[in-house]
Image (cartoon, rainbow, N blue to C red):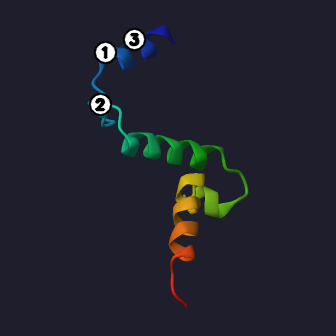
Amino acid sequence: MWLQKLLRALSPSWVDIPAKSSKEAADITAHNIVCSYARGNVNLQRGRYLTSEQLEIRKQKLAHHAF
């Protein structure tokens, strides 16, 4: 068991690690967390959801739209 942990720590990672923390990296991380914890809701598992920021932007766009 400890040998596996040691090998994982010493071997290069196949996951791209961003050089700096950015909004895109945070969004990807949040997306992966939601997908992994969503149980029974296919839309959440596939990433089809709006964050509160995205919802506010959509509301503002619809408020200014001329029907």
Q: How far apart are marks 1 and 3 (CA)?
A: 6 Å
Q: Give the residue at x 65% y 62%.
A: 42
Q: Is residue 52 above or below residue 66?
A: above
Residue in front for this viewpoint, 27 or 63: 63
Measured as percent of width and height from the top left, residue 5 is found at 44, 14
Q: Do the residues labelled 1 and 3 touch (CB within 8 Å)?
A: yes
Image location (x, y in percent) of residue 12: 27, 25
Mark 3 sits on what residue? 6
Q: Name the residue under label 1.
A: 10
Identified at 43% across, 10% down, the residue is 3
Q: Can residue 46 be seen in this view?
A: no
Disc 3 packing (10 Å; few <14; some 14–19; many ≥20): few
Q: Residue shown at 58%/49% (left/top)?
A: 35
Instruction: Indicate the quadrant containing the C terminus: top left, top right, bottom left or bottom right.
Output: bottom right
Residue 20 - label:
2
Where residue 20 appears, as percent x and y from the top left, is 29, 31
Decide which of tag 2 and tag 1 comes sooner along the chain. Answer: 1
Quarter assignment of residue 26? top left
Q: Which of marks 3 and 2 is nearer the N terminus?
A: 3
Outermost residue toward the top in this view: 2
